[in-house]
């Protein structure tokens, strides 16, 4: 239930890969069906083919009320889904965001790093001033462990299913550049508070790298979208300044799944050969 509260919705297979990768699908299905009979979760059906159906699980209002005070979810707003129709409107994007998380979690287990279900937080809102906000599809926390050395990494993750124009996707980099520069002003003060610093320092010791995960179109289309992101970095002054301080990369979701996120599948938006996301 906590995993559904964190990730909004998930298939049975995704929950198994995330929570019990060594367990059986049947065990998880029994648990989910019991929670459904108790009124804490519900599911809608994703009809993939005329023979294949997939259950999409999400919390009910009662389930959301029960999980809101769990320590792992402290500060997360409740997110109940009130009907199968409401679930269907969010299914494709939400499942793709979770689909992108799973290769990172599996890579971390394989490499002995630290990254689990609570280290991937969907839809974290950040003010960028003038009443506007940027909401990354996910904020990722990941710890690289090499003997006694621990390297803590963070990333804003944008999932692109090619449902918006390439220009609108690239414009997101401008919003991140605004977040990088934005300094919140205390209420009632006319002048900036001395040494207040950028607002993002309230949450992050270092500005997170920005990762674009692309899917939902042909390889040519996805390559063109990556080049448009690179063009924004090259030509927009605020984004160019951001790129000198923050690592920016793009990868195709299917490449991440096939070769792992630690493979050389990430294209630096500042140019150069593909590399692991940790080496951008």
Image (tube, rainbow, N blue to C red):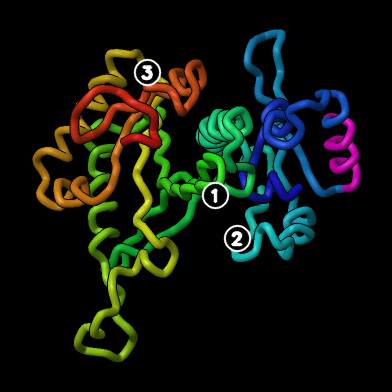
| Label 2 packing within 10 angstroms: few (<14), some (14-19), many (20+) | some
Instruction: Give the structural element (helix, strand or loop) at label 1.
Output: strand
Judging by the rendered image, the residue that carries numbered circle 3 is: 217
**Is 37 within the magenta?**
yes
Residue 127: x and y in percent read: 36, 64
Task: Decide if residue 159 is on the left or right side of residue 179.
Answer: right
The residue shown at (58%, 34%) is 108
Q: Please state which of residues 272 and 64 is positioned toward the viewer in this rendering.
A: 272
Determine whether 61 is above or below 218 in the image. Answer: below
Q: Please state which of residues 90 and 26 is positioned toward the viewer in this rendering.
A: 26
Judging by the rendered image, the residue that carries numbered circle 1 is: 121
Q: Is residue 8 visible?
A: no
Specify start and end residues of the magenta stretch as a single range: 29-38
Residue 156: x and y in percent read: 40, 47
Q: Disc 2 vs disc 1: Cβ atoms closer than 8 Å?
A: yes
Q: Quadrant of residue 277?
A: top left
Q: Disc 3 vs disc 2: Cβ atoms closer than 8 Å?
A: no
Comes first in the chain, label 3 or label 2 = 2
Comes first in the chain, label 2 or label 1 = 2
Determine whether 106 is above or below 172 in the image. Answer: above
The residue shown at (61%, 29%) is 106
């Amino acid at each position: 239930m906590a995993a559904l509260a964190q990730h909004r919705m998930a298939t049975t297979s995704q929950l198994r890969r995330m929570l019990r990768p060594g367990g059986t699908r049947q065990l998880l299905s029994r648990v989910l069906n019991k929670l459904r009979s108790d009124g804490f979760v519900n599911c809608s059906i994703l009809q993939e083919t005329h023979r294949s159906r997939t259950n999409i699980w999400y919390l009910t209002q009662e389930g959301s009320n029960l999980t809101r005070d769990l320590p792992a979810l402290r500060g997360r707003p409740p997110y109940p889904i009130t009907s199968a129709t409401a679930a269907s409107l969010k299914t494709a994007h939400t499942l793709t965001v979770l689909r992108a998380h799973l290769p990172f979690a599996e890579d971390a287990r394989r490499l002995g790093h630290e990254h689990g279900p609570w280290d991937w937080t969907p839809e974290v809102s950040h003010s960028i001033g003038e009443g506007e906000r940027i909401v990354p599809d996910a904020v990722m926390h990941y710890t690289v462990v090499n003997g006694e050395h621990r390297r803590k990494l963070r990333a804003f993750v944008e999932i692109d299913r090619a449902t918006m124009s390439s220009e609108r996707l690239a414009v997101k980099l401008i919003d991140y550049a605004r977040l990088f520069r934005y300094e919140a002003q205390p209420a009632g003060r006319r002048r900036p508070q001395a040494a207040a610093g950028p607002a993002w320092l309230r949450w992050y010791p270092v500005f997170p790298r920005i990762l674009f995960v692309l899917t939902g179109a042909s390889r040519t289309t996805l390559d063109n979208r990556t080049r448009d992101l690179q063009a924004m970095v090259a030509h927009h002054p605020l984004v160019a300044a951001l790129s000198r301080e923050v690592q920016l990369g793009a990868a195709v979701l299917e490449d991440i799944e096939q070769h792992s996120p630690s493979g050389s599948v990430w294209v630096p938006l500042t140019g150069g050969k593909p590399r692991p996301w940790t080496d951008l």
